[in-house]
């Protein structure tokens, strides 16, 4: 055997081991990037509000419909950030505002997430919370900033309170 072949065997083995470690690292990264979208990932969707929005503005009839301006490009970006295909589980989803428009939420991508329908605390249950908090803000029961905080910190507990006949705290 020539010395070139002897030298290349350890090199091939080292290359193979390095390639295996690299493959494992890439696979781990891909798995780590698959998100549970039953709640927004705070790194991807921390929530954002319209600067200076007031109670009077959000309580004006038709305000949410006028404020809704999410583009198809933004929706594609949101699905991509979460590593989801909107045609595959856990979808069907809707690209939704984490802080809802009816509570002064923004159309910025940092306020959007792919909210699924088919999970325990899915889109329809969050809608119940949003409507209740909007009514309470407009009725003077709670402040707009408090309603936004409830959504951001733990809207499912608010849903549980509503379901049991209590107020959101």
Image (cartoon, helix red, strand yellow):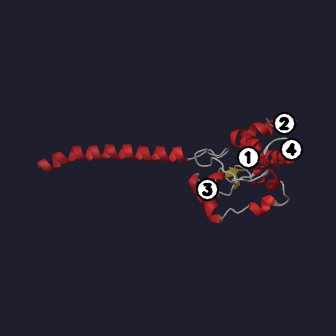
* Residue with the most extreme left position: 2
Q: Which mark is residue 167?
A: 2
Instruction: Say few, some or many: other residues with alpha carbon within 10 Å of mark 3 (under 14 / 14 to 19 / 20 or more).
Output: many
Circle 2 — which element? loop
Circle 3 — which element? helix
- Give the residue pinned by disc 4: 140
- Give the residue pinned by disc 3: 78
Residue 1 visible (yes or no): no
Mark nearer the N terminus (2 vs 1): 1
Query: Residue 110 location, x and y as percent?
Result: 62, 52
Mark nearer the N terminus (2 vs 4): 4
3 or 2: mark nearer the eye: 2
Distance of label 3 from label 2 (alpha carbons): 32 Å
3 or 4: mark nearer the eye: 4
Instruction: Say few, some or many: other residues with alpha carbon within 10 Å of mark 4 (under 14 / 14 to 19 / 20 or more).
Output: few
Query: Residue 129 location, x and y as percent?
Result: 80, 45
Circle 1 — which element? loop
Task: From this view, report whether residue 26 is shown above or below residue 94.
Answer: above
Circle 4 — which element? loop
Task: Name the residue: 84% across, 57% down.
Answer: 60
- Give the residue pinned by disc 1: 122
Task: Name the residue: 76% across, 46% down.
Answer: 126
Query: Residue 162 location, x and y as percent?
Result: 84, 38
């Amino acid at each position: 055997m020539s010395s070139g072949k002897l030298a290349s065997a350890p090199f091939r083995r080292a290359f193979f081991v390095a390639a295996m470690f690299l493959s494992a690292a890439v696979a781990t990264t891909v798995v780590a990037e698959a998100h549970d979208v039953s709640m927004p990932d705070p790194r991807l969707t921390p929530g954002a509000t319209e600067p200076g929005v007031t109670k009077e503005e959000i309580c004006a009839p038709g305000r949410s419909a006028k404020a809704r301006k999410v583009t198809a490009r933004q929706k594609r970006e949101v699905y991509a950030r979460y590593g989801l295909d909107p045609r595959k589980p856990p979808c069907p989803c809707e690209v939704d505002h984490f802080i809802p428009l009816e509570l002064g939420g923004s159309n910025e991508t940092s306020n959007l997430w792919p909210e699924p329908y088919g999970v325990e605390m899915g889109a329809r249950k969050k809608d119940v919370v949003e409507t209740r908090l909007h009514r309470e803000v407009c009725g003077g029961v709670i402040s707009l900033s408090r309603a936004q905080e409830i959504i951001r910190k733990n809207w499912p507990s608010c849903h549980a309170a509503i379901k049991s006949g209590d107020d959101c705290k």
